């Protein structure tokens, strides 16, 4: 897997801390920093997600992908899956994630809660590289709700 990240703030542009990533699959992804009123040259313009937000979002995408795939392989009629992530970070540098909570909402027809619980556990214990990696530093907790589709 490869990715190239390029600074977009060079040559006197107004975005001091903007970056664009080009993924190995050819997709572009913008990143920016928060504005810094005290030192505008060190801050961003709030035009895109922060890199740490993308790390959190990528982890959510990784685990949601696993959960849907595991449920489908179990022949469950899954119709929707979302995961809301909340996190805490260290207050000093490096400001790593210290706690992450993932709250899943799975929608489908007659999906047993035990199947959802198992899918989440398999993702976090075996398949989701992102959450397993972050789990080395952060305490990760999960919860879920199953919604019956109409």
Image (tube, grey):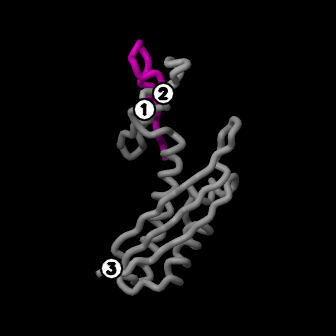
Q: What is the CA distance from the residue labelled 2 to the residue labelled 3? A: 43 Å
Residue at 63%, 61% (x, y): give it.
Answer: 140
Discs 2, 3 touching: Cβ within 8 Å: no
Q: What is the CA distance from the residue labelled 2 to the residue labelled 1? A: 6 Å
- Answer with mark 2 or mark 3, whichever residue precedes in sequence: 2
- Answer with mark 1 or mark 3, whichever residue precedes in sequence: 1
What residue would you read off at disc 2? Answer: 35
Residue at 42%, 64% (x, y): give it.
Answer: 82
Prevailing secondary structure of the magenta residues: loop
Which stretch is magenta? Answer: 1-20
Image quarter where the C terminus lies is: bottom left
Does dot 3 land on a helix, a strand or a loop? Answer: loop
Q: Categorize mark 3 by other alpha carbons within 10 Å: few (<14), some (14-19), many (20+).
A: some
Does dot 1 land on a helix, a strand or a loop? Answer: loop
From this view, report whether residue 82 is shown above or below residue 4: below
- Answer with mark 2 or mark 1, whichever residue precedes in sequence: 2
From this view, report whether residue 108 is shown above or below residue 81: below
In which image quadrant can residue 19 be found? top left
Discs 2, 1 touching: Cβ within 8 Å: yes
Q: What is the CA distance from the residue labelled 1 to the residue labelled 3? A: 38 Å
Which of the two residues, 136 or 109, is positioned nearer the viewer here? Answer: 109
Q: Residue furthest front?
A: 37
What residue would you read off at disc 1? Answer: 46
What residue would you read off at disc 3? Answer: 149
Which of the two residues, 123 or 34, is positioned nearer the viewer here? Answer: 34
From this view, report whether residue 95 is shown above or below residue 39: below
Q: Is residue 4 magenta?
A: yes
Residue at 40%, 83% (x, y): give it.
Answer: 75
């Amino acid at each position: 897997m490869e990715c190239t990240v390029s600074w977009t703030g060079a040559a006197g542009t107004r975005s001091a801390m903007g970056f664009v990533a080009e993924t190995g699959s050819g997709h572009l992804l913008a990143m920016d920093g928060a504005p810094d009123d005290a030192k505008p040259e060190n801050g961003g313009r709030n035009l895109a997600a922060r890199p740490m937000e993308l790390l959190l979002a990528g982890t959510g995408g990784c685990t949601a992908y696993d959960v849907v795939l595991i449920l489908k392989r179990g022949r469950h009629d899954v119709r929707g899956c979302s995961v809301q992530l909340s996190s805490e970070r260290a207050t000093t540098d490096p400001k790593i994630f210290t706690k992450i909570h993932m709250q899943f909402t799975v929608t489908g027809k007659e999906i047993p809660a035990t199947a959802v619980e198992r899918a989440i556990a398999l993702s976090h214990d075996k398949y989701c590289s992102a959450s397993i990696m972050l789990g080395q530093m952060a305490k990760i907790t999960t919860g879920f709700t199953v919604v019956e589709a109409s």
